[in-house]
Image (cartoon, rainbow, N blue to C red):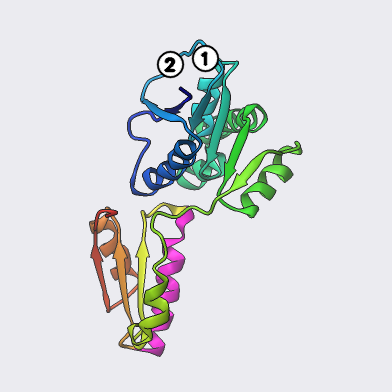
Amino acid sequence: MKTVYFYLPKGTLNDATEYYCNLIKRAFKQEGYTIEIHDKLFKVKHDVYIVAITPADAYQIKKKNPKSRLVTWFQGVGPEEYIMLHGKTVKSFLVKKLSEYWERKALTQSDIRIFVSEAMLDHYKSKYQIPIDNYLIIPCYNKALNKDLIIDNSSKYENLSFVYAGSLYKWQCIEKTLEVFREVEKIDSSAHLTLLTKEETEAKQMAESYGIKNFDVKYVPLE
């Protein structure tokens, strides 16, 4: 029986990544593979597919299993994200260089590369000046679109109501979201913003700091 191994260290999965990983699992199952999940580094004795969801994990897996067929999901651009989070310090520079080393290795050693957008693919091609083939582009999402709501319930959109769902990392542009909604609220005082995030206290403070009046903050699980 064919087996595909997923390397998912503790803390790797959240509402978004779990759904995305399940898509990859489903694809392998449809091809007749069984799934094994590992949260610690492991070694296999034969040529198998191993899925990693960060360049650092992909590097470690390939180092441990050089003959494996590596599948890497590139979720984001780690080196640049680290600089945005921590600023331009000596430590940030060193972490960025190490992250870029992992990134390049994962790009060149993977047998299948999964990107979330054409822009990400273009970024890697431009940054590293290396050929990138045998890849898939799967937009990052965690719920299927219910088209019936759009087609049949047009009354749903009679009032301006917006939802932000996600965490508050800088690259997710929560500040820009709040800036834009502040301007919307000036045009239509009945407009409403819902922030769905685990960081409820911080999100409330941010919305208040932008002078937004009509908002609420909640967290709901993926299901």
Locate residue 143: give its quadrant. Answer: bottom left
Q: On the image, numbered disc 2 is attached to which residue? A: 42
| Picture layout, residue 34 above or below residue 87 | above
Tell which of 117 and 22 is nearer to you. 22
Q: Is residue 186 visible?
A: yes
- Measured as percent of width and height from the top left, residue 100 is found at 61, 33
Q: Which residues are magenta?
A: 171-188
Tag 2 and tag 1, C-beta contact below 8 Å: yes
Amino acid, disc 2: Phe
Amino acid, disc 1: Lys
- Measured as percent of width and height from the top left, residue 79 is found at 56, 39
| Label 1 secondary element | helix
Tell which of 176 and 191 is nearer to you. 191
| Label 2 secondary element | loop
Disc on res. 223? none
Disc on res. 64? 1
- Measured as percent of width and height from the top left, residue 58 is found at 53, 27
Magenta portion: prevailing SS class:
helix
Q: Quadrant of the C terminus?
A: bottom left
123 relative position to 88: left or right? right
Give the Cα separation between the discs numbered 2 and 1.
7 Å
Q: Is residue 185 visible?
A: no
